[in-house]
Image (cartoon, rainbow, N blue to C red):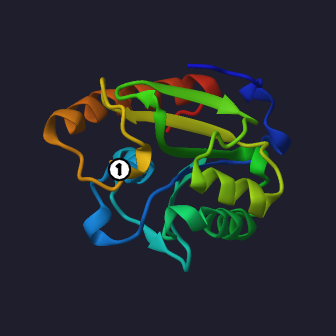
Amino acid sequence: MQKSKNANNLENKQKLIILGLGNPKEELNFTYHNIGILFTEFLNKEKVWKVKNKFSYCQFKNYILVKSNEYMNNSGEAVLETLNFFKIKPENLILVHDDADLLLGTYKIQYGKNSAGHHGIISIINTLKTKNFWRVRIGIRPPNQKAKAESFVLKKIIPAHLKIFEELFPKIELNLKKLFKTKN
């Protein structure tokens, strides 16, 4: 885990938004590109989502869980609508998304980084006109996978990899709780 900004000094002590990126179509649910949405579904123990136009959400005491209802390449639209709806600044946004540059079973938590070529992040940076937000980059690249990300991000997650993610998600949740000192 990499921490590049003090998480305890969040802008105006606003609520956090944890927003999972992915693609909205049912047939894309359990693909590598939807790992951000899968993570927010893991966090939402209540399994109830309120649906808006470009996002769905569930509100808790210290944070708001959101999953994008936009396609990955248009993620900026969902993020902007979310921030405007909740009147929250980008500095209090935690995006969760796949990262083909990281090995399967690894992740990084970072603040204020460039897109590294991720089309969803490019859309968000261009729409918000800032890169000053948090990112949880979840590695999806299997060992020895040399192919370009486009060749596997929309494939269904195989059961062995799904088990890796199921073991990884509680670790990410714990680190987010420590980093942002949230209780629920």
Q: Secondary structure at mark 1?
A: helix
Q: Is residue 57 at least partly visible in the picture? A: no
Comparing 154 with 129, the one in front is 154
In this view, the residue farthest toward the front is 147
Residue plotted at (50% across, 45% down): 97
Q: Amino acid at mark 1?
A: Ser
| Residue located 57% across and 22% down the image | 178
Q: Position of residue 1 (x, y in %)?
A: 55, 19
Left or right placement of residue 130 versus residue 1 in this view: right
x, y percent for residue 96:
52, 44
Q: Residue 171: horizontal and vertical position, in percent?
A: 40, 24
Considering every residue shown, the one lying at the far left of the view is 159
Residue 138 location, quadrant:
top left
Task: Determine the residue positioned at 79% across, 42% down.
Answer: 132
The x, y position of residue 174, in whole percent, is 46, 25
**Viewer-side residue, 117 vs 38:** 117
In the image, 162: left or right of 42? Answer: left
Query: Circle 1 sits on which residue?
Result: 151
With 169 as the anchor, is 91 left or right in this view? Answer: right
Residue 140 visible within the image:
yes
Q: Residue at x 37, y 64 (%)?
A: 48
Q: Residue furthest bottom?
A: 53
Q: Is residue 138 above or below residue 63?
A: above
